[in-house]
Amino acid sequence: MKKNVELQGDTLQSKVDCEELDWGNEVHVGHIKETYPDGFDLILGADIYILFREILQSDSAYAGRSFPTSFLNQLVPRYHQSAVKPLFATVKALMELRPVGSCKFILGYVSRFKSNDIAVNAEVQRLKMDICEAPGTRKSLAGGAHEGWVYEISIKPDQS
């Protein structure tokens, strides 16, 4: 990504930066908060999805081993659910750099597992954030095997 930003730098009217950010990594979040103390108007996430099988196959402890598809398919939903909390904790920490209502998280989302859909909505509610599907964004994907849409997520105003 950094190389892409560097290559496009002269053609862009606005300044674009690229920073390393692993969801839930307090060092990365701290660096971004320190570097950009005024926060962001928008935080974009597009189809945030990492296949567990790719992690297994790239991890040296598992390299060269083969795993039955049924085993991998059982692990994928659990992995993704475990990623939901650090994702939204990170997003909320970055959104809180701005006054409530002045930053949105735009998430391009692909529904692959109903359990993930439930986990995403539960975490958003737990963190007192608003989530709504952007009208007209729902599309059938992968020959109808999945659906995708865009969520607009913001921090709820204080109700006290």
Image (cartoon, helix red, strand yellow):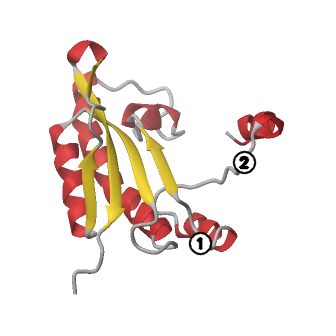
Residue 4 is drawn in which quadrant? top right
- Describe residue 43's horizontal placement relative to residue 76 as left or right: right
Return the disc, 2 or 1, that comes first in the chain's sequence. 2
Q: Residues within 10 Å of mark 2 (few under 14, many from 20)?
A: few
**74 up-or-down from 84: above or below:** above
- Describe residue 23's horizontal placement relative to residue 30 as left or right: left
Residue 132's mark?
Answer: none
- Describe residue 18's horizontal placement relative to residue 86 as left or right: right
Mark 2 highlights which residue?
A: 14
Residue 136 at x, y percent in the picture: 27, 31
Q: Residue at x 79, y 40 (%)?
A: 9
**76 up-or-down from 97: above or below:** above
- Describe residue 31's horizontal placement relative to residue 24 as left or right: right
Q: Nearer the viewer, residue 142 or 51?
A: 142
Residue 28 is drawn in which quadrant? bottom right
Q: Nearer the viewer, residue 83 or 61?
A: 83
